[in-house]
Image (cartoon, coloured by chain):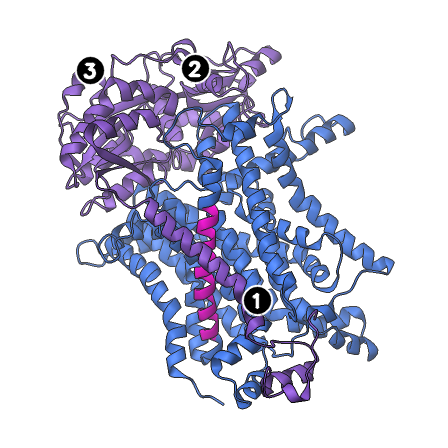
Amino acid sequence: MKTIKNRYTIIIAGVPLTFLALFYFYPLIKIFTLSLIPDHALDLREFGKLISTPYYIRTLWFTTWQAAVSTVLTLIIALPGAYIFARYRFPGKNILQSFTAIPFVLPSVVVAAAFHALLGPRGILNTWLMNDFAFAAPPIQLDHTIWFILMAHVFYNYTVVLRIVGSAWSRLQPGLTEAAHMLGASPWKAFWKITFPLLFPSISAASLLVFIFCFSSFGVILILGGPRYATIEVEIYRQAVHIFNLPMAAALSLIQIFFTFAFMWVYTTLQRKTSVALYPESRRATQKTPVRLRERIIVWGNVLVMVLMLGGPLASLVIQSFRAPDGFSLVFYRAIFENRAQSIFYIPPVEAIAYSVGFALAALVMSLIIGGCAATFIVRGGKRITSLFDPIFMLPLATSAVTLGFGYIIALDRPPLNLRTSIILIPLAHTLVAYPFVVRSILPALRSIPENLRESAAMLGASSLQVWMKVVMPIVRRSMIVGAVFAFTVSIGEFGATVFVARPQTPTMPLAIYRFLGQPGVMNYGQAMAMSTLLMLVTAVGFLFLEKIRITSEGEF
Amino acid sequence: MDLPVEPEPDNAGGGMKAYEKVILQRDGFFLLQDEVILMKRYGIYFFILAISLTALIGCSRGCKPEDTTIVNVMTHDSFSISEGVIAEFEKKNNVNIRFIKSGDAGAALNQAILSKENPLADIFYGVDNTFMSRALKAGIFETYDSPMLNSVDDRFKLDPEHRLLPVDYSDICLNYDKAWFRDKGIKPPENLEDLIKPEYKGLSVVENPATSSPGLGFLLATIGHFGSEHYLDYWKKLKNNDVLVTDGWEDAYWGQFSAASKGIRPIVVSYASSPPAEVHFSQKPLDEAPTAAVTGPGTSFRQIEFAGILKGCENPEIARNLMDFMLDKTFQEDIPLQMFVFPVNRQAQLPAVFSKHAKLADQPVKVSPEDIAKNREKWIEAWTINVLR
């Protein structure tokens, strides 16, 4: 049954494509034109330099392999977590789940501070090892090593795998593996032959997000890795900002975009071949309380990993926000509420929270609409549409923020799109980075809906809107919430795009943190830590609220 | 499945549609019953939508221009000034000043250059002498021979055409952790040569000149001091003495410097005005700064910051007034405690914490903006190859 309803298709394809055309391709083409065709003649000298300089080849190679290793590590560490979240009920589960996404909102300077406090040469762990085990020098030396980069990437991306794979796993009928067991398969064989292939679409979706995230990694590399390591994104920043060599920055950006597109293309081809439609199972039927000893060990062991790996650095931040030079104190929290310097750029915490949450909600709504339409378009379209548009929809996530920021300056400067310094540009830029997460979250769920479920609904007289609301929506809702959580997180952490967008006073929480860290002095550092703690708190409350929506809704998949 | 589902045969044509019943019977769980539940379920999304729309409308209202003229000032993220000072100018001239922050100093300037056909602002604040040539070459600034320049020493006026007017300055130099050197009984560093001595092995952290402006300033100090033929020899020795390079000031100061963090390196490249900032932003009042700046002859690079009126701006008249105001005493005296740099107006009084704890460099190293413009890329490239790779 291939009756493409043209009107709907136009709307569904039109929304994300218009958005991309206006806020992605148009500014990007403008800046590329300016950089590479300065005097109406194509200047490709920089490309030649790029290909012939070993340094750039090495940078590309480093960018690729560190992203691949980070992705594999994240999968290894997070898949067991996804399993217990999908299959077991245990106390504190919801709180734990929202807490795993908190790293995502923290600026990399703050994450660096957290890791230093824990694992630095004078950090908690080294001090303990040196005192109790009589090491002469700090035994753990992570600073400016590849290990630090990999660790931070796992720290940031754990939640991506946990949520995307976890939500798919919980839709999977346990009956399938039980049948395999009954037929004599070992648990390991049952996993490899049944569970893994069925989970593959969501595992690959999560891996792709993690990979792209690490491929375009910027702050982590710059701050934790130190200047010896450079990804393409870092090199673009150096070229564009410090050397102001726009042709080279443009050439590097194009390379970055090209590679992302290529990875995506391989991925979508794979994805199409592996996707299996299944009747989704309700969560109620797939989850149980851990009873046997082995189950308990698996569940609580994983919880322990999460608490130590993610909770350790976060806790060290919170502790620092309370630790003044002379002991425990609330002095930093009191200080963020007063404008001691009388500065015009003082950011009252309440206002910062209001702005951050406001932008995040706006970005969330826009991302859901755009991401939802994009995913529906991909699922409904034929093979050709999928293999072309799926990669295109992912490009913004892997496009250099500085290039795009410069593009906005020259492209959005005239009515009707005179948005250069408009406050609207900020949630728009956030949406651009956030909606790919929505697409990746809901695509596996959308694909898993058996066609005959829709068909039978349509045959029995449901309009396509009704089919969507009553068949599709309940099945993908949980994935949509996963996407919504990501959109909210990406925006509240000001991840990526907006760093290079010129903006009037829009006091968000991450900006407040950067402001404090810009000047020396104990009070500045303490206030930055207090503001970071506040950011974590607001994020966690936001998540709990989003999760709440899901718990109270009935008949969910 | 908390809601009881009782499909009654006689209700089949009413509350539930046939296809719902089919799904319901097939899987044995509840889907949707009627529109009331629909609203109940999706109400939350409408709620979020409503809130965010309200928020958006709210903020676009709040930022809507009023009847008074708006003067836009484009600047970098580190810029700061007192509310009262700005309010004074706004009241006197019946205008509103809006600050547009555009990333770090380099990113902000590049955005100003990119938007030169259609400037984002009336005034740009924060081009330093390392970026000066790039700004002048791009031709984005208008000449303005402000009468207030009379109160500024000639050594700060690097642009004879007055397109860029000096507003503040500071010295990029070494800072050290006083307590650390006292405890270890080692003599604190006094000059650049000290850093390559064996007893200073592994003690210093510097910033990458390719990504950080104090880093570039310090590289220029070494080039000015040792000469462009020999500075690399110094850096090679420094590298052998286990110097640590970070990409930005934040990581160096908050991540590695022993006086400000859990780091273990007691020497950092920062500003001569960082010690007074340590006193000013201390938790308890301090008599003495915990850090000190090395300001002896030939050890520091003087960074001068400029502001200029953007060519083709909307309000050139008021922009000139604002430029005068920025060079006037009120604004200039506000600069030190807001940005921890020194005012260029010689009549401006320094605040107590500055006069007590801040030192100015004694004979800072001189490198002309033309030299910097000509060699910047080459020097950074050579440095990168020799120190990082």
Tell me which secondary structure the magenta stretch mostly adopts: helix
Look at the image and give the colour of chain B.
purple
Label 3 is placed on what type of residue?
A: Ser
Residue underneath mark 1 = B40
Q: Are marks 2 and 1 on the same chain?
A: yes
For the residues labelled 2 and 3, the Cα–Cα distance comes to 28 Å
Residue underneath mark 3 = B151
Residue A373 is one of the magenta-drawn residues:
yes
Task: Give the blue chain's letter.
Answer: A
Q: Judge left or right: residue A97 versus residue A34.
A: right
Residue A109 spot, x, y in % from top left:
51, 38
- A241 shown above or below B253: below
Task: Please report whichever mark, 1 or 3, sits nearer to the chain's N-terminal start.
Answer: 1
**Displayed quadrant of residue B1:** bottom right
Quick one: SS at disc 1?
Answer: helix
Quick one: SS at disc 2?
Answer: loop
- A250 shown above or below A189: above
Task: Please report whichever mark, 2 or 3, sits nearer to the chain's N-terminal start.
Answer: 3
Farthest residue, direction right: A293
Task: Please report whichever mark, 2 or 1, sits nearer to the chain's N-terminal start.
Answer: 1
Q: For residue B294, which numbered disc appears in the image?
A: 2
Which one is closest to the eye, mark 2 or mark 3? Answer: 3
Residue A555 spot, x, y in % from top left:
65, 71
Q: Which residues are magenta?
A: A356-378
Label 2 is placed on what type of residue?
A: Val
Residue B331 spot, x, y in % from top left:
28, 22
Q: Nearer the viewer, residue A461 or A403?
A: A461
Quick one: SS at disc 3?
Answer: helix
